[in-house]
Image: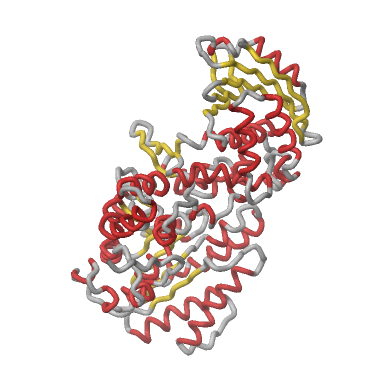
Amino acid sequence: MRELKYPIGIQTFETIRNDGYVYVDKTAYIYDIISKGQYYFLSRPRRFGKSLLISTIEAVFKGKRELFKGLAIDSSDWNWEKHEVLHFDLNPRNYKEHDSLRTILDVHLRNWETQYDITPDSDILVDRFAAIIRKAYHLSGNKVVILVDEYDKPLVGTIADRKLQDEHRNLLQSFYGVLKTLDPFIRFGMLTGISKFSKVSIFSGLNNLEDISLQPQYNAICGITEKELSAYFEGSMEEMARSENVGVDEIHNQLKANYDGYHFANTDEDVYNPFSLLNTFKSKMFGSYWLATGTTSSLLEVLNVNSYKIQDLEGCRATATMLNGADIFLTDPIPFFFQTGYLTIKGYDREFKEYILGFPNREVAEGFNDLVLKTWMRRSEPTAIVSEFVRDVRSGKAEEFMCKLQTFFAGIPYDHAKGMSQNDDEYGIRGDKEIHYQNVMFVIMKLMGFYTHTEYRTSNGRIDMLVETADYIYVMEFKIDSTAEAAMRQINGKGYALPFGYSHKKFIKIGASFDTRTRRLADWIIEPEF
């Protein structure tokens, strides 16, 4: 059997088809949307195939039927009429400079002005864009197709700089507004991105713009389903099984645990992360491929601004309105985590019309905590420290663990250790220092693989952190700018050990205090109770 060519990093449909790369046929979805509507918006996480989807739509409207031989749309009644396509790709650029968005838009417009032999009468971007659409329409005799890939990159890239984000937002408002004013000249328009910024006028100005992001029938328009995995990659799984010297079922189970589990609607249909799946097949090794291409800096920024506890991400709830919006990230980080792919839909509460969210799979759940810790430590690999923590906690060496933990906190840079966003003053929000320290402890314990629960409820109060190993139960209470003695008095005074009296495990109480002035773990008291 000929080994498949995997299109990793290749987002051009024509290249994939001409050069023999494997292509998972999504043209039935494409036929559905282009034959039924005019304007669409689709939100999906990065590296999920949005760019390839846009490139495929472009090839359809350019009438390149020869590329679609054997695909679903080739056997449909599509007329393959040729249209001029104006394709904006806003992904490759960094938008953290003031004129960066204007510059890349100008580059696109200049290319089309050259192509259509247009001498612009104005320097205004909107006027030039309108002139290009009209000229393309009159030259071809057919309506124009507008495709915008990663429309929101200038906004997502400046999420921590509200002033610059507003500058980009205002420019996009006027630029995309052309689609409404020149509607008679436009056959089809589609925008893709990670987030739907509701204040961008295209979403309020175009009443017929259809957001298909949460519609069940388009759940798998990007990504790879279980059926597609079997149809296209059965040989790939067999090759991995031979390489790993295990059965195909074992490979399938690992693929499912690591990379499946995405739901972009209230549906039972699972979707695999295509980037991680293809990289696994190419390398014949399991790894955190999707996580390795991203960054947690903006995620931590959103968490800190909202003083949000990491453990609350699993099982959180949101309405469709919340999941569709990105402007509310200052008051709720959940939409941002969903849109960036760190959370996915796990269930739906019909009574309250709320989606229940959680980490989609092992790659994201474990990788997120690992990346957070790496970001805090500014070290490429914190595994050695974590392994030392594991040995101490497993063996009941609480004093050794706390000493190492003190050293760890001392190594966290100031901008993370202060427990709040660098832009707190700008947003008028102060980070919750206690939650910051809880987040650090929670991530460490989760990476160590122990049962960890923060704010564990008892009949007489809430334990800050409960950690359980095979032989030990640790009850931890943290005080901020107070004393370890006060923390231990609370443990004993509220009888936090009582609910665990039935357990055969050894019980260890730890009261600790953090000093926000020095940003250090200042002191602790350990009391074993057998």
> Image height check: is 193 above or below 449?
below
Residue at 61% x, 64% y: name it.
Answer: 95
Q: Position of residue 202 (x, y in %)?
A: 46, 61
In the displayed structure, 85 sits above or below 26; it is: below
Quarter occupied by residue 360: top left
| Residue 491: x %, y % from top left | 65, 15
Residue 479, by quadrant, is: top right
Q: Is residue 57 above or below residue 419?
A: below
**Residue at (64, 22) in percent of width and height:** 476
In this view, the residue farthest toward the front is 245
Total residue callouts: 0
The answer to whether residue 458 is left or right of residue 9 is right
| Figure quadrant of the N terminus | bottom left
**On the image, which quarter does residue 35 sit in?**
bottom left
Location of the C terminus by quadrant is top right
Residue 4 visible to the viewer: yes
Image x and y of residue 513, in percent: 74, 25
Q: What colour-coding does the image apply?
A: secondary structure
Does 167 sit left or right of 283 as displayed? right
Q: Residue at x 54, y 61 (%)?
A: 153
The residue furthest right is 518
Q: Position of residue 331 (x, y in %)?
A: 58, 40
Is 219 on the left-hand or right-hand side of 515?
Answer: left
The answer, for residue 185, to whether it is visible in the render is: no
Q: Nearer the viewer, residue 396 or 191?
A: 396
Q: Nearer the viewer, residue 149 or 83?
A: 149
Q: What residue is shown at x 65% (from left), y 62% (from top)?
A: 96
